[in-house]
Image (cartoon, coloured by chain):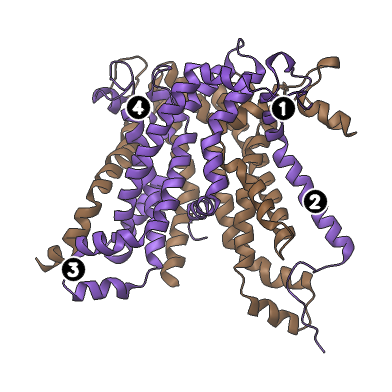
Chain colours: A brown, B purple
């Protein structure tokens, strides 16, 4: 009884959120899984189970594997690219630079823009043309003497198309990664650096032996966030071209299935996306909660 | 003898410094390049706009593209709808996040960490995983599109409130963790209950966290596309991202007008970012947990 008096009001205060999350997150995840076990392919819901047929159909589906392949390429280019650019920018700014505030603002502003606006602008930039109609990036590359970099970008008929659409994604998020790394680097206590310097370490050695090992949490956060964004990216690809098979990923295949009332297949793809995400996110949350308890 | 290096702008050789600024400047140009195209194109007179000439400066300034873009119901209604959705959902989910953050930090019950972890996981779920149940639920409750008087905006607001809760809770929990327990303990000694100390002390104290949370939520609701595209039905109820995507996809809409529309649709979040960048940044950092 005393426990109820003690914890009751607090639980009451957060109960609306708990109910909403229980229904809209966990309830819906379960509901979605249930749909993935049915044969629902029309406007009217069907709830008779067909077991894991949808999963085995998906495993046998070439479109699914093509999209998975696209997602892997997109993820690698986007995540590695944003990590490298973000890390390099943070490294260059670490010791403080003239106009730091302005630089940071410029690198970070794409985060504030919607992926739709980003996609529309980049679609035009990457829109190649030929001869007199050459435009966008290709024209720019030509005029600065980098003609060999010209390409078909997202219109390429090879897997380069999906790699090209990772560029706008990297443009949007590299600044964020820069901010994460910069915070990580500056979070290293000065005493540690000083101690190493007193011991005769060069600045390079200080970075490698003192700062670098302490950047592991920032690197992990950055990677987890980027991979998570990559897996669910929908709007960017959809706005660049909703019908182009060469830039389709499972997130778009799911949406396309839903649009065609193939709800069972859509739910199956969605369930697989959740499981893939959980594999990355759950250890991350566990690690974060554990390190929080320690401190 | 050890020479203590001065920490600051003068570190490294001159060559190194030139290299550093050169690289940083190249990235500034790369990051601003798309914005340059959007701005110069939208400021050209409509008959001056051409795709091959997108890098050229306008010969004279014209705001006709902006007028044309705003004249489109997709953009005009879209702006109004997005303001309604983003404002309501960001305020409500911030208030709920404040309650959650306070309880999970200052009035911890047994199992509070488990609850918090479950909320965090909710932050990372791909929304595709709840899309089908969500459309079913909203259809069954009559909140989605079609016959519903708001054309689906009500459903959209609810979705943004609910899926905003994990991040707003995280922001407020982090904020309250930095507030000394003694403040609330002395209130407790004075006989204040949980609700009383939340209402009279916790809420007013958390104004900076509200700024972070509302800005962050406003931006993500404004920039959303996925929920909007499944839950709203036509150009009277579309949020601006859907309207923008639809006019940009139409062959009949001129390039200059599309660019102007993209700029208009990005302006509110860009302004928030420019004016309140500090709070925007803190929201960003909260999204990365503690690291």
Visible residue check, residue B109: no
Residue drawn at (42%, 27%) of the image: B80
Query: Dot 3: what SS?
Result: loop
Q: CA distance from mark 3 to mark 1?
A: 60 Å
Marks 1/4 in contact by CB < 8 Å: the verdict is: no
Q: CA distance from mark 1 to mark 2?
A: 22 Å
Q: Is residue A40 left or right of residue B12?
A: left
Label 3 chain ID: B
Residue behind mark 2: B23
Q: Is residue A170 left or right of residue A258?
A: right
- Asked if labels 3 and 4 share a chain, the reply is yes
Residue behind mark 1: A125
Label 2 chain ID: B
> Percent x, y for residue B264?
56, 29
Visible residue check, residue B181: yes
For the N terminus of chain A, the quadrant is: bottom left
- Asked if labels 4 and 2 share a chain, the reply is yes
Label 4 chain ID: B
Say which of A195 and A26 sits in front: A195
Q: Which quadrant of the structure image shows residue A242?
A: top right
Tell me the tag on residue A23: none
Residue behind mark 4: B153
Query: Dot 1: what SS?
Result: helix
Residue behind mark 3: B192
Q: CA distance from mark 1 to mark 4?
A: 33 Å
- Asked if labels 1 and 2 share a chain, the reply is no
């Amino acid at each position: 009884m005393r426990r109820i008096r003690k914890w009751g009001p607090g639980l009451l205060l957060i109960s609306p959120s708990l109910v909403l999350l229980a229904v809209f997150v966990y309830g819906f995840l379960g509901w979605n899984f249930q749909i993935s076990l049915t044969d629902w392919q029309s406007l009217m819901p069907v709830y008779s189970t067909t077991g894991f047929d949808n999963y085995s159909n998906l495993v046998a589906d070439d479109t699914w594997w093509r999209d998975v392949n696209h997602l892997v390429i997109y993820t690698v280019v986007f995540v590695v690219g944003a990590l490298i650019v973000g890390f390099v920018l943070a490294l260059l700014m670490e010791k403080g630079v003239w106009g730091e505030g302005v630089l940071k603002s410029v690198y970070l502003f794409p985060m504030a823009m919607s992926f739709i606006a980003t996609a529309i602008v980049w679609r035009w930039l990457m829109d190649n043309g030929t001869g007199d109609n050459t435009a966008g990036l290709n024209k720019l590359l030509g005029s600065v003497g980098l003609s060999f970099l010209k390409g078909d970008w997202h219109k390429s008929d090879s897997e380069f198309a999906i790699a090209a659409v990772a560029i706008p994604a990297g443009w949007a998020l590299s600044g964020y990664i820069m901010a994460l790394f910069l915070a990580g680097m500056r979070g290293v206590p000065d005493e540690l650096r000083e101690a190493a310097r007193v011991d005769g370490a060069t600045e390079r050695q200080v970075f490698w032996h003192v700062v670098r090992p302490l950047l592991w949490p920032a690197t992990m956060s950055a990677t987890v966030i980027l991979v998570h964004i990559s897996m669910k990216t929908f709007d960017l690809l959809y706005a660049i071209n909703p019908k182009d098979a060469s830039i389709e990923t499972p997130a778009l295949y799911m949406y396309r299935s839903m649009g065609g009332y193939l709800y069972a297949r859509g739910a199956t793809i969605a369930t697989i996306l959740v499981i893939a995400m959980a594999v990355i996110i759950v250890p991350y949350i566990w690690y974060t909660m554990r390190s929080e308890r320690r401190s | 003898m050890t020479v203590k290096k001065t920490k600051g702008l003068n570190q490294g050789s001159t060559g190194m410094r030139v290299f550093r600024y050169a690289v940083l400047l190249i990235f500034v140009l790369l990051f601003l390049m798309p914005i340059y195209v959007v701005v110069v194109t939208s400021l050209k007179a409509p008959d001056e706009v051409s795709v091959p000439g997108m890098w050229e400066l306008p010969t004279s300034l014209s705001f006709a593209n902006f007028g044309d873009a705003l004249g489109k119901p997709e953009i005009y209604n879209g702006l109004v709808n997005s303001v309604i959705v983003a404002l309501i959902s960001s305020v409500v989910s911030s208030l709920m996040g404040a309650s959650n953050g306070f309880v999970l930090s200052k009035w911890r019950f047994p199992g509070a960490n488990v609850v918090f972890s479950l909320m965090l996981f909710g932050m990372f779920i791909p929304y595709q995983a709840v899309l089908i149940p969500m459309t079913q639920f909203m259809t069954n409750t009559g909140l989605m599109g079609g016959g519903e008087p708001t054309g689906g905006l009500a459903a959209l607001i609810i979705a943004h409130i609910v899926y905003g809760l994990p991040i707003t809770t995280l922001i407020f929990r982090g904020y309250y963790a930095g507030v000394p327990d003694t403040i609330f303990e002395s209130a407790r000694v004075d006989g204040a209950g949980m609700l009383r100390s939340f209402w009279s002390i916790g809420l007013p104290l958390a104004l900076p966290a509200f700024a972070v949370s509302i800005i962050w939520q406003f931006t993500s609701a404004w920039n959303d596309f996925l929920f909007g595209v499944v839950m709203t039905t036509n150009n009277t109820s579309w949020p601006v991202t859907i309207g923008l995507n639809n006019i940009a996809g139409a062959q009949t809409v001129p390039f200059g007008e599309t660019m102007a529309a993209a700029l208009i649709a990005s302006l509110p979040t860009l302004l928030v970012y420019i004016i309140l960048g500090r709070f925007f940044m803190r929201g960003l950092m909260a999204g990365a947990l503690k690291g």
